[in-house]
Image (cartoon, grey):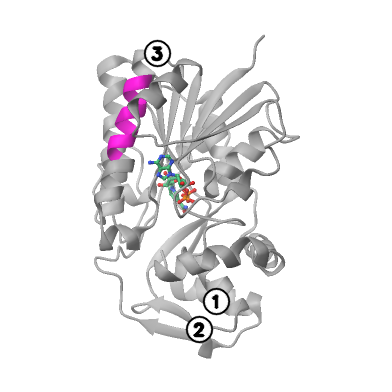
Amino acid sequence: MSPTRILVTGGAGFIGSHYVRTLLGPFGPGDVHVTVLDSLTYAASTANLDEVRHLDSFRFLAGDICDEALVGDLIAGHDQVVHFAAESHVDRSIRSSAEFVRTNVLGTQVLLDAALRHGLATFVHVSTDEVYGSIATGSCSETDPVNPNSPYAASKASSDLIALAYHRTHGLDVRVTRCSNNYGHRQFPEKVIPLFVTNLLDGKKVPLYGDGLHVRDWLHIDDHVQGIELVRTGGRPGEVYNIGGGTELSNRELTDLLLETCGAAPEMIEYVDDRKGHDRRYSVDWSKIQTELGYKPGKDFADGLAETVAWYRDHRDWWEPLKDRAVRLAGPC
Ligand code: NAD
């Protein structure tokens, strides 16, 4: 049987590159060819793909998902799309949202149109728990309505709705995943964990928003990749799957753990003005992917955090060049 040809958008970013390295690694399915389409924005790192660059089953293309001609040609030669490409940093969407609407909404629509025209088999759309908005208690299930607050979340919710509309209207096999906050190595040092870790490694304070009591669920990157792969291979068309990690922490609790792991004192916390419209708590119910597809997060949070900190300690060559860009665009996620 010929290999499944998968187009991965945004594969030079944090999650997309983990996904590609896993697909083409020793524990991957083995019967896939992967093309990465990535426009190499500030958030990308081509070094993220060094491990797979030499493989015959891998191809990289620098290009924009909004480029209709390019996307049409590419999708014609593929069986499946796993769509990660996005503007992903909430703070940047508050400062300026145009690029978020262009890439996250228009770019997704361009991909979906090409998928429909060329009879693509499966389209996995990677989204976020932020589309549900803030929830004081309990957890959001896949049938809850979207209620996004930040421009980032609104752009992702828009793209989810368009993706699901292509299933309902045209019968395209679209599957949507909505995950909680990812962590792990190779995350761009503007997001809270790598920002705080790299600050602490440099002996700098960490900027904690507001009262620090905003709550997030933390999902290790390997567990997220496992969830996406389960959805790609076994998910049902037109369905949404929440993916959580099972470790709910306030930002203050997270910061305390980071200080402890980095051997830093509580005085290294600098409370800063809260993010505008900062959602208090996100929480997703991920029992559907668990019961339907056998998803089970495997990474203990303390282990995952310690490994992540150790990786940043050992890979200054990776993050130092990116940190300048991050500082210019700064703010925790
Ligand atoms: P990232 O910012 O690290 O990577 C995004 C990648 O997309 C980059 O390589 C960038 O160059 C590429 N890209 C941006 N605009 C593009 C365009 N117009 N054309 C082609 N490529 C483009 O993001 P990430 O953290 O890896 O997130 C991946 C996906 O997961 C996103 O869709 C994001 O919304 C979603 N997500 C992320 C998290 C998280 O905790 N990081 C949580 C929930 C959902």
Q: Which residue is mark 2?
A: 205
Q: Amino acid at mark 3?
A: His
x%, y% of residue 314?
72, 66
Q: Residue at x 55, y 57 (%)?
A: 187
Q: Residue at x 25, y 41 (%)?
A: 145
Viewport quadrant of the N terminus: top right
Q: Secondary structure at mark 2?
A: loop
Check residue 106 for magenta coloring.
yes
Q: Secondary structure at mark 3?
A: loop
Q: Which residue is mark 1?
A: 199
* Extent of the magenta region: 105-114
Q: Give the numbered dot on residue 118.
A: 3
User: Mark 2 or mark 3, which is nearer the start of the sequence?
Assistant: 3
x%, y% of residue 317?
67, 64
The dominant secondary structure in magenta is helix
Check residue 157 for magenta coloring.
no
In the rendered image, which quarter is residue 22 located in?
Answer: top right
Camera-near label (3 vs 2) is 3
